[in-house]
Image (cartoon, rainbow, N blue to C red):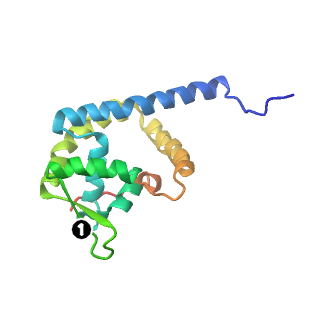
Amino acid sequence: MTDPTPWLSPEESAAWVRLVAVAELLPSALDAQLGADVGLTHFEYVTLMSLAGAHERTMRMTALAALTNATLPRLSHVMRRLEARGLVRRFPCPEDRRATNATITDAGLALIEQAAPGHVRAVRSNVLDALSPTQLEQLYEIAGAVLGRLDPEERLNATSCQFSEGPRTRIA
């Protein structure tokens, strides 16, 4: 009897374990920098950036959860912490009272503006500065191929961003 499992070749295995290592180490590095600089986790920063880029700086919690790839319970827990710090405000959705909206406050905008320079430095030092221009384009292509399988509905901005344009972000 033959085993139908398509086992990884040595090259595939090496690439896979390196990807897993990056996926494990990068979030901690970004959390450490943001935590030291402004007392945020990377997920909190992404959540605030998502709200900052939304129309009228406001989103339904369900849409924000989808955009940040979070469950509603996780997002609600994070939003309670951010709300306690005065960085966001939640309120009933005027169009559907069963839904809850979230908006970033002026204090939240100020904090992400304060956090952004250090975050960009961390992204550069941990990832981008290690890559040549060719490798950067390859990383974009490789990540896009994988994201196309993991996020075929393009819920995350990263899935649909174009190399020459970057992701859709707007801080109003």
45 or 161, nearer to the observer: 45
Q: Residue furthest right?
A: 1
Q: Residue 169: give x, y in percent of width and height.
A: 31, 57
Location of residue 102 by image quarter: bottom left
Three-letter amino acid code at disc 1? Glu
Query: Taking 36 as reference, is 142 left or right?
Result: right
- What is the secondary structure assignment of the residue under circle 1? helix
Q: Residue 171: give x, y in percent of width and height.
A: 23, 58
Q: Is residue 131 above or below residue 101?
A: above
Query: Taking 147 as reference, is 119 left or right?
Result: left
107 or 82, nearer to the observer: 82
Q: Which residue is mark 1?
A: 56
Location of residue 126 by image quarter: top left
89 or 125, nearer to the observer: 89
Q: Is residue 85 visible?
A: yes
Disc 1: CA contacts within 10 A as few (<14), some (14-19) or many (>=20): few
Q: Is residue 58 above or below residue 133?
A: below
| Residue at the image position 12 percent from the left and 53 percent from the top | 107
Query: Taking 162 as reference, is 43 left or right?
Result: left
Work out which quarter of the rendered image holds the C terminus and state it. bottom left
| Residue at the image position 61 percent from the left and 26 percent from the top | 13
Q: Residue furthest front?
A: 98
Q: Residue 55: give x, y in percent of width and height.
A: 28, 67
